[in-house]
Image (cartoon, grey):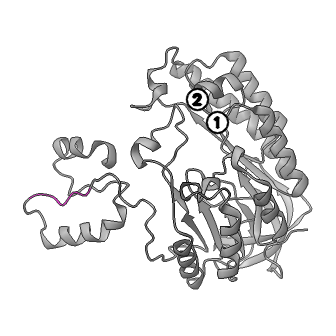
Amino acid sequence: MAQRYGQEIRRRVPEVDATIGTQSWPKIATLLSALQERPGAGRRPDIVEWGGDVTASVTRRATTGASAYVKITDGCDAGCAFCAIPAIKGPQRSKPAADVLREVRELAAHSVREIVLIGQDSTAYGRDRGERDGLPPLMRSIMEAAPEVQWLRLMYAYPQHVSAPLIEVMAASSRVCHYLDLPLQHGHPDVLRRMRRPHDVDQVVRLADELRQAMPDIALRSTFIVGFPGETEQEFEALLAFMRRLAFDKVGVFAYSREEGTPAADYPEQVDEATIAERYDRAMLCQQEISLQRNRAQIGRQLPILVEGSGEGLVVGRSYREAPEVDGMVLLAGQAPIGEFLTCRIIGAQEYDLIAESAEPAQAPSGAS
């Protein structure tokens, strides 16, 4: 909001002390210093600019837990009809590899054991610098630079950019989580065309097959939008069929929201809110059935669990199959410090969470059996 509506915020909300935009965030320390030096006096030190270094590297510190996100790209070139990110953050830019490695080393020095690589399109890393497939070598460099990091997880992978070298890196290293997030947004080619998204649904099916052949234990995640303008009941039913066909382990469903300044906001045939809500509920119920089935398939497996919390006789953690903050948890009785790996046997499954037993220190945190 500060990036897009900075002047409007200043005009309508005089109580705001300052505004800083998405392309100026590395200057936040300067902004706070100015506020401390001139509390309530004169013009507010607003920093909202365009063309800033959205991938600037700053000193990293772990906050809580043993996992941390590392942004390797920012901005986006995709131009999806429903998305305002290009208007807010500008074109895609990649963080220099040296800066990424420095951040990872700093986090590892502060007991972070899981690094999650993110970007609007993580698989586009390096393309703005002319690199054709820059992500696989970056991942290799991270593992070499920070041997203390036991899990390396990849989020937001554009399906058309998942290359054979990337699959090879994921399959070859036990430290790379056999987990991949593929934000697809829909399963009907006509809706995808209106979204200005890649619409080759069969290519996505082939990719899922390739990933599962290379890594039979891989957990696949995706996100879908329901109620996009013009979505018919037939197209929505095709989405449900697509979800059942691919059987993603994890899925996020979003109700379409009309975003000001995007092409889709001006599309005719906007779907009414009641229909959107009804389709959201149906999509969630569809995925809950799939998720429960996929979780039940884990019963009997022995998995390393990264502890995220413990108290009152309950340990809460995650296996390689669950990304922090967006997926379910693994629950088991006992006590353990945050950041420790435990070897657990899965004994129960719910729609989102797994139940485990026998917490012991893990010998090989990255593997599974």
Q: Which residue is drawn at 44% across and 77% down?
A: 59
Main secondary structure type of the part rendered in magenta: loop
Q: Which one is in front in this view, the residue at disc 1 or the one at disc 2?
A: 2
N-terminal of the two: label 1 or label 2?
1
Residue 310 coordinates in the image, percent (x, y): 65, 73
| In the displayed structure image, the side of residue 197 where residue 348 appears, left or right | right
In-front residue for pair 106/233: 106
| In the displayed structure image, the side of residue 58 where residue 42 appears, left or right | left
In-front residue for pair 192/347: 192
User: Is label 1 in a helix, a strand or a loop?
Assistant: loop
| In the displayed structure image, the side of residue 56 where residue 157 appears, left or right | right
Q: Residue at x 66, y 62 (%)?
A: 135
- Would you place residue 241 above or below residue 203 in this image? above
Give the tally of numbered discs: 2
Would residue 285 be counted in the magenta stretch?
no
Q: Mark 1 points at which residue?
A: 185
Q: Mark 2 points at which residue?
A: 195
In the rendered image, which quarter contains the N terminus? top left
In-front residue for pair 343/209: 209
Residue 33 coordinates in the image, percent (x, y): 22, 72
**Magenta range:** 43-47
**Residue type at tag 2:** Met
Quarter of the image for residue 303 reads bottom right
Q: Residue at x 35, y 54 (%)?
A: 51
Q: Residue at x 81, y 45 (%)?
A: 207
Q: Within 10 Å of the Cα at label 2, are there few (<14), some (14-19), or many (20+) other Cα atoms?
A: many
Residue 299 coordinates in the image, percent (x, y): 89, 58
Q: Within 10 Å of the Cα at label 1, are there few (<14), some (14-19), or many (20+) other Cα atoms?
A: many
**Residue type at tag 1:** Gln
Asked if one can make out residue 237 in the rendered structure from this viewpoint, the answer is yes
Decide: marks 1, 2 in contact (CB < 8 A)? yes
